[in-house]
Amino acid sequence: MKATVPVTVAGLKTACSQCNLVELCLPFGMSENELDRLDELVGARRKIKRQQNLYRAGDPFEAIYAIRAGSFKTDVLLEDGREQVTGFQMTGEILGLDGISTELHSCNAIALEDSEVCVIAYAKLEELSREVEGLQHQFHKVMSREIVRDHGVMMLLGSMRAEERLAAFLLNMSQRFTARGFSAAEFHLRMTREEIGSYLGLKLETVSRAFSRFQDEGFVAVQQKHIRILDNAGLKRLIQHQPCGR
Amino acid sequence: MKATVPVTVAGLKTACSQCNLVELCLPFGMSENELDRLDELVGARRKIKRQQNLYRAGDPFEAIYAIRAGSFKTDVLLEDGREQVTGFQMTGEILGLDGISTELHSCNAIALEDSEVCVIAYAKLEELSREVEGLQHQFHKVMSREIVRDHGVMMLLGSMRAEERLAAFLLNMSQRFTARGFSAAEFHLRMTREEIGSYLGLKLETVSRAFSRFQDEGFVAVQQKHIRILDNAGLKRLIQHQPCGR
DNA sequence: TTGTGTGTTTGATGTGGATCAACGGTAGCC
DNA sequence: GGCTACCGTTGATCCACATCAAACACACAA
């Protein structure tokens, strides 16, 4: 079927209740009892090597995926080859929600590094969330959060200038690394300048120049993919009070 | 509380089962029996005058809304006043999904004309969708469809040129009017050039010029807000094979 | 009717970011 | 450990769209 690494039928029956990602993932806020029921839901794990697809646009939709390790990008391709990266996903985040509407995936999900996901059969998820109120509620929140995030990206793309977009991107990454217990000030980007550019509606040269400019201004120290934020407040200031572009 | 027209406690107990918008709205694809149960869900209708808010960013989230008549825009505001229109909604479409994630609305919903919505209490919706499988499934599809739509807008904003964006916008409007039984070729836009521009990440002058250019090329006949599409295929061609901008 | 305000069109000019090009760094791979 | 893609940086130039400006169309109210 697919040239990806086969499913690992995880022997561990305690998928979620023992996972250290609970407070970032679908089970967030659920009670002990509810959590136990969740374990029946997560059937298997799947490893995805760097650059491989978790799913492709057009694939039949059967499951959503919780990222257990690693990170991904999602993108949409136009017939003429243009790529729009629609998001970067980190541990605990959910992939595949786009597939529910037509029962076909509408975008590609590609691993940015060797990664692992928990496979959540969608039919089972609907079934269980009819019984487990906390699961239903959390699942709805996850979908809604994705919609709100998308609106933020529209704001970026439609109303912000190149440097504002990159500043917003860096602050967002920093905040998500923090939530995962990593340093807010120092992190490693897994995506290329081109992928950042595609996400932000910019060319890679523009991204690179903006990084250089931030470095000159003392906002960040950049060494390839390694980022150190030196002036968080300065970046925040950049986003507002700009004379604006379009 | 709010300076909007008060809730009309609709005497009609048959909200959805008799509504002619079923196949465009939340109840789509539900069985007769399921539909009857839906009627308990839609408690009231609310009229919103042109330019008034259905809800504002920051308002507590209690309900989602199905548009019964009229149309809306949703937007996000930056502190410095910049506006990003995140969508235009027509009859049968659902508003308010952004509020589920934080229990506060994250955008503004404003009527583009005098409109009416069905108020769907969210707590009741969750309750009922635990019992009515078809409702649960449809609701998830509606949310997922919104996510897919948002990805399409990102594609527009991030990867397409001004004229491609407007062409895609017009084709999208045409298709949605068709689904509502109106002419695919001739329709009336309820939003201003500035609102279209904000949605498409363009200035109103650029939108106006693109309209003029489309008219010169014979793709459409434009008279203010009244649009007649003369060459659907031509517009479609515009979207692909473009040398591209950014 | 005329006035007033809001929305639209069109022209002239400016500029942010794209494009083209060349070089430098680094990491994956034999 | 050295070769070779790929990735990132920087400079020069270009162009699509923004900005500024002015006139025009239409809606509504007095």
Image (tube, coloured by chain):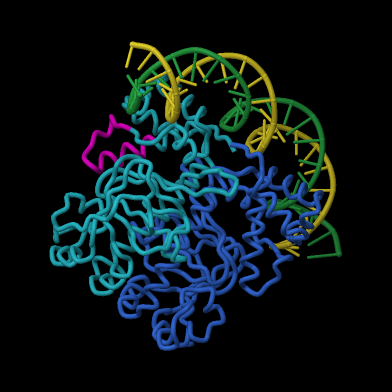
Chain colours: A blue, B cyan, C yellow, D green
Res B231 visible: no
- Horizontal side of A159 relative to A231 (left or right) equals left
- Residue found at x 46% / y 81%: A9
Residue A120: x %, y % from top left: 42, 73
The residue closer to the viewer here, B116 or B4, is B4
- Horizontal side of B172 relative to B135 (left or right) equals right
Q: Is residue A164 above or below residue A142?
A: above
Among the 4 quarters of the image, the one containing residue A20: bottom right
Q: Is residue B178 magenta?
A: yes
Residue A168: x %, y % from top left: 63, 54
The residue closer to the viewer here, A29 or B181, is A29
For the C terminus of chain B, give its image quadrant.
top right
Q: Is residue B79 above or below residue B245?
A: below
Residue A152: x %, y % from top left: 53, 53
What residue range appears in magenta?
B170-188
- Residue found at x 47% / y 78%: A29
